[in-house]
Image: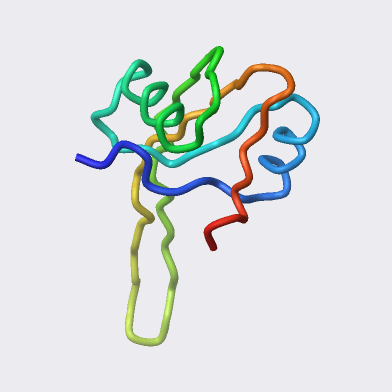
Amino acid sequence: MSILIKPIITEKATSDAELNNRFSFIVNNKANKIEIKNAVESAYGVSVEKVRTMNVRPDYKTRYTKTGVVTGKTNAYKKAIVQIADGETIDLYANL
């Protein structure tokens, strides 16, 4: 079971990483905070101070087309925001 799926690289997440030393990741839905902390520490070699998690709900969309009503949704996922110690950083662009 892979704990860390991918980092979140958005404008808001990048500014939070630069200003507050908090990094965001999409993680496995069944992972808990202790598993996420151990996975980040082993993958990036940093010391984690705090982990906050949230379950992101799916978005539902309905379109009215010529052929009828088309409905769809995005996938639900779990997001983790990881606070690391001062003076340490994670280079998310190193292995792209």
Work out which residue is located at the far top of the displayed protein and give it. Answer: 49
- Whether 58 is drawn above or below 84: the answer is below
Q: Residue furthest right?
A: 19
Numbered disc total: 0
- 82 lies above or below 15: above
Residue 58 rendering spot, x and y as whole percentages: 39, 46
Q: Quadrant of residue 54?
A: top left
Q: How is the image coloured?
A: rainbow
Q: Quadrant of the C terminus?
A: bottom right
Q: Residue at x 62, y 38 (%)?
A: 90
- Determine whether, in the image, residue 44 is placed left or right of residue 34: right
Depth order, front residue of 33/29: 33
Q: Residue at x 47, y 30 (%)?
A: 80
Q: Quick one: 46 or 76, which is closer to the camera?
A: 46
Q: What percent of the width, then of the height, locates residue 43?
A: 43, 37
Report the residue that reaches farthest toward the front.
45
Left or right relative to 91: residue 59: left
Residue at the (53%, 14%) spot, across then down? 50
Q: Identify the residue at horizontal 33%, vertical 85% (top origin).
A: 67
Instruction: Please state if 46 lies on the left or on the right of 27 as rendered.
Output: right
Note whether 51 is above or below 72 in the view shown: above
| Residue that extends furthest to the left in the rendered view of this protein | 1
**Residue 39 in the image, given as x and y percentages of width and height:** 37, 30
Screen quadrant of the N terminus: top left
**Observer-nearest of 14 and 94:** 94
Q: Nearer the viewer, residue 78 or 86?
A: 86
